[in-house]
Amino acid sequence: MTDDVALRDWLHLTLIRGVGGESRRQLLKVFGLPEAIFAASTGALREVVGMTLAERLLRHDCERDIDAAMAWAAEPGNHIVTLADAAYPQALLDTGDPPVLTFAKGRLELLNRPSLAIVGSRNATKQGEGNAEAFAATLSAAGLTVISGLALGIDAAAHRGALTGRGSTIAVIGTGADRIYPSGNEALARAIAEQGVVLSEFPLGTPAVAANFPRRNRIIAGLALGVVVVEAAPGSGSLITAR
């Protein structure tokens, strides 16, 4: 895993507001590692991301947020996984927008195991939930890790089914890893953190913001070999994830 000094630089890069994923990856492509980015001159940074972001990179103070993230990572079962770590999900490297850093609670080895996603409606029928749970249990028993988004309905049913097998489950969430949404899935999230993985790219403390859930869907799709959709409305996020 990344050492503490280097990890602070990775966190610094991801916690600066206004510097998005594309800019971060471009900076890493040019400079190599975060420590080299923060050691670069304003002029060198300006050539890559422009003056506004260059000044933001060198002047933004996020030490309090970095300290909080480091304290969170020091707790048992908590991990911060960067692009430089062997535990980083290799499947995400083949996507167009891989997160530079993720927060994970649980079994990191599952991030690089063969997996399938099961997604669907939050307002599922009982039959739909039963089908999702049965599919997930069968896949997990066969050794496949089941990925979903910890939402009510189909997602929750898929996680429950997957926890019964050796493949277990990954919950990709749209909040900070220290927050669970919806609150009704708190017990399920704790079980996943113990037997599987809860994964988030969002900074700690990030609340449930509508725009973050479509972003987390790209990670669900990127991790999985395929996506099983159960009871989804036309135009839903589940069908977008599958496509």
Image (cartoon, rainbow, N blue to C red):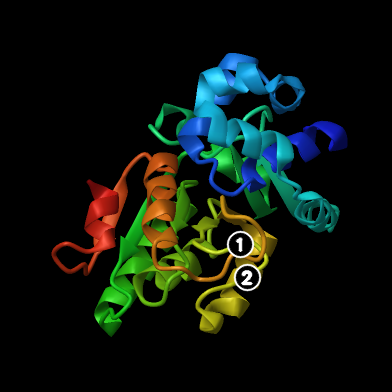
Compared with 98, 39 (above or below) is: above
Secondary structure at numbered mark 2 = loop
In this picture, residue 64 sits left or right of residue 110: right
**Mark 1 and mark 2 in contact (Cβ < 8 Å)?**
yes
Q: Which residue is mark 1?
A: 176
Quarter of the image containing the N terminus? top right
Where is residue 9? Give x, y as percent.
76, 35
In this picture, residue 17 sits left or right of residue 223: right
Residue at the (79%, 52%) spot, across then down: 73
Q: Quadrant of residue 38?
A: top right
Residue at the (80%, 31%) spot, across then down: 6
Q: Amino acid at mark 2?
A: Arg
The residue lying toward the viewer, choosing from 189 and 211, is: 211
Where is residue 95? Give x, y as percent.
40, 32
Mark 2 vs mark 1, CA separation in Å: 5 Å
Q: Which residue is mark 2?
A: 179
Q: Amino acid at mark 1?
A: Gly
Where is residue 54? Give x, y as percent.
61, 31
Residue at the (71%, 19%) spot, across then down: 41
Crowding around mark 1 (Cα neighbors within 10 Å: few <14, some 14 to 19, many 20+) is many
